[in-house]
Amino acid sequence: MSSSESAFSSLGVQDLREGYLRGDFSAPEVISASLARIAELDGGPSGLRAVISSVEAGAIGDSDLSAPFGGLPVLVKDNIDTADLPTTAGSLAFAGSIPTADAPIVAAIRKLGGKIVGKANLSEWANMRGNHSSSGWSAVGGQCRNPHALDRSPGGSSSGSAVAVAAGYVPLAVGTETDGSILCPAALNGIFGFKPTLGVLPTKGVVPIASSQDTVGLFARSAKDLSFAFGVLADELRAEHGKSGGFHAALERSRNRPFTIGVPRSGFFDYSPKVDAVFEEALAVLRHAGVAVVDGVDSKTGTDFSISEEDELVVLIWEMHHDLGAYLARRGVAGASSIKEIVDFNLSHPRAELEYFGQEHLEAAVTLEGYTEVGYRRARSENLRRAEGAIARSKTLAEVDLLCVPTMGPAWTIDHVNGDFVSGAGYSVAAVAGAPSISIPIGEVSGLPVGMTVFSHAYADAQVLAAAERIADILAVRLTPRFLPRIDS
């Protein structure tokens, strides 16, 4: 694996904007460099396999450099509809199938001057196909790999989006999250990943799992780039619906206010003792810099942050039956216009689709055997009550603005026999609550990145991003992939 840096691979969103305005380089140069880096690092037996499809350099067209995203190369997760490239969700049932229209999030990026250079690999069907899956594997894209160590998982399900940013393909990528699919790969690849409040960025045109949790989010190499990109997109999409924007004003207000971080302890530690040590060191640095930290907010306030994975699966299966079923019917791809047809396709292509793991979740979504609407509503209500209540209770009783936990342990070894090994994670409460959350790189363990998750209540997006900017400035962690063949345990 080559680790050579192209001229633009380390530049962020705003670095490129400023370079364009100064005349340091042109949009065709940057786009060509992006595509060249993908070609250099992505293919072959030891390639990163972060990209499923890409455009031809000559097909990009002119760039309006005065636009907010003018000339900016962007990768989009391959479960988001694009009218010029296939949208497959990683499934061979959709191979080569191009939707008739861009998803609204893609249309907004293009309108703002961004250039979609390709579609990013992912965990097939956003990791809701079956048990014992390997994050970052899809039948269309193969196994995506972590650029810090090629034998390690990239996380998922927005695997390729995170890897592409970490490896310098693009400064900005779009992903989706139902529970952890942005924060997990952001942490494992040593970059910033932001999951906004549910519904702030539209999910129309996204291959769905569950409307009560599905969220479009972003990856970048700095918190400031995420704030800029999210703010521009959020304000543009609100304007399209006749609403005033105002995100950047809210962000400025949040930047000018001190904040207090609360650290819940029960259930959020012991993923890895070494990660805990990195997290504690980061907390110490933040305290020394004057950030107020309230430790043990759960024990101080009697707050229970636990949610039921069993109840969450009930919600995801029930909603997938309806939401994915409706999407497939609208998409109307021959032989793939229902969940049942997808299941049958996989059964008829077992070596290509089912060699490594099964499709239990898809099968359950077809029949809904053992699932009832009463059971679904109870499961959703109970988990939402727990998640929202835990956030609200901590913020009120402990008088904190934000909550902060380790995102997860370091990247595990890719294993197509046993599937993923996840020792624990800190992102599910925000995911179930539909609340904003971000993973911030805080260091590494044996050369593998680890992250810190910061989250708050719904619609506190500006506050979360402003805090992330401040935390990132204080910690000043920048993790550069080394493309090692392996890291021994």
Image (cartoon, rainbow, N blue to C red):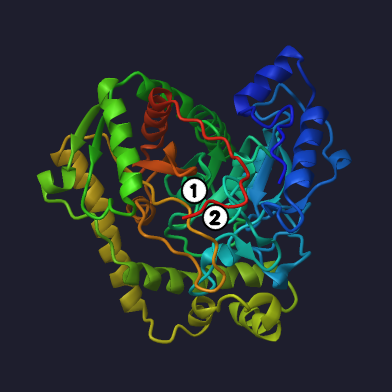
Spot the residue most to the front: 488
Compare residues 104 and 148 and report the one nearer the observer.
148
**Mark 1 falls on what kind of element?**
helix
Q: Residue at x 48, y 31 (%)?
A: 223
At horizontal 50% and vertical 45% (from top left) the residue drawn is: 186
Q: CA distance from mark 2 to mark 1?
A: 9 Å
> On the picture, is 263 further left or further right than 1?
left
Residue nearest the viewer, comparing 155 with 127:
155
On the rendered structure, is 18 left or right of 133? right
Which comes before the other along the chain, label 2 or label 1? Answer: 2
Q: Amino acid at mark 1?
A: Leu
Q: Is residue 407 above or below residue 112?
A: below
Residue indicated by mark 2 = 152
The answer to whether one can see residue 159 in this image is: yes
Q: Look at label 2 and name its amino acid.
A: Arg
Residue plotted at (30% across, 45% down): 276
Q: Residues within 10 Å of mark 1 (few under 14, many from 20)?
A: many
Residue at image point 42% right, 28% down: 472
Q: Is residue 184 left or right of residue 359?
A: left
